[in-house]
Structures are given as C-alpha cells and as structure tokens.
Amino acid sequence: MNEEEIKEKLRNYAKILNSLYSAGVVRTYNSPVGDYAEWIVSKKSGLELRKNSAAGFDALDKNTGLRYQVKSRWMHPGKNSRQLNVIRDYEKKPFDYLIAVIFGVSFDVEEAYQIPYEIIRRYFPQNKHQNGIVVTLTNDFVRDPQVRDIRAKLV
C-alpha cells in the first residue's frame, strides 16, 4: 500500500467517524469500539447514557436507578484476547452491573453478559500495576450462575 492509499483510507475513516459522531453513535473520537458498545447497550436495553465525564458507570436505568458499566472488546485479526479495559475505583461501588460485549470481526455482537458487581471480586483481584481490576471473560467466569447471557437482547 502506498502513501496515497494510506491517506485515502485515513480520510475515509475520518468521514465515517465524523458521521457516527454526528449521529450520536459514538461520543468521542477515540476508537469507536467502546462508544458503539455503550450506544447499542443503551438502545437495546432502554438505558440512558450518562455524559462522558460521569465516573464509574456509563448508563442508567431511570426506572430502577440501577447503574451499568459497559466494557467491550473487538475480536479483529490479531486480537483474540478476552480481556476488558480496567475497572477503576471498584471499592466505591460505582456501578451495579457490568455489561461485557464481545464484537466479532465485522462488529456483530458475538457475546454479551450482564454481570453483578458483587461477583467480579471473586474472580479478579486488584491489579496494582493497572490500578484497578482487569476482567477477562474466561469460561469459568461467564458460566457463573449469576452471570446472565444477554446476547439475544443486543442482536
């Protein structure tokens, strides 16, 4: 691929990202994976997205007051880790449920789980290096009886 082809692909990426931002699908100009996960979870679950500056949770159920933190992973070529981004300030109980979404290579929802706050610590200790808890969607974890598979709700 030559330099002009690279620039053209980046221009197309910018157009797409600007369009997604204008439509409210993404809320930042970072990688759209996390914003897309938050958007799809809120739309399909009837949750209200919080402002980007809201610490600790991403969406709120206005009927129940339950708070949801959304984490995601895009399984593109070269990326097969099921590790989610770090959860900070876990001890402050900033959310009631973690929603974990795994996107396939074409951004289809391959897996999605609703995880109660209380069970995360059972599986994952504080990671001093990351200054938080790092959740990996291992088989043992997602098969815990308290973890709810919500993929059907999001597709």
Image: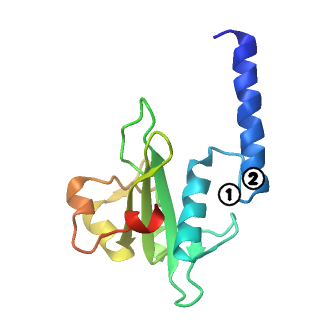
Check contact, mark 1 vs mark 2: CB within 8 A.
yes
Q: Is disc 1 placed on a helix, strand or loop?
A: loop
Q: Residue at x 77, y 29 (%)?
A: 11
In this rendered view, identify the residue nearer to me: 93 or 149: 149
Residue 140: x and y in percent read 20, 58
Q: Amino acid at mark 1?
A: Val
Q: Residue furthest top?
A: 2
Q: Residue at x 68, y 63 (%)?
A: 52
Instruction: Say left or right for 129 vs 52.
Output: left
Q: Amino acid at mark 2?
A: Tyr
Residue 75: x and y in percent read 42, 41
In this rendered view, identify the residue nearer to me: 146 or 104: 104
| Mark seen at residue 25 | 1
Vertical order, 13 against 135 (above or below): above
Vertical order, 4 against 10 (above or below): above
Q: Quadrant of the N terminus?
A: top right
Vertical order, 77 against 145 (above or below): above
Residue wearing tag 2: 21
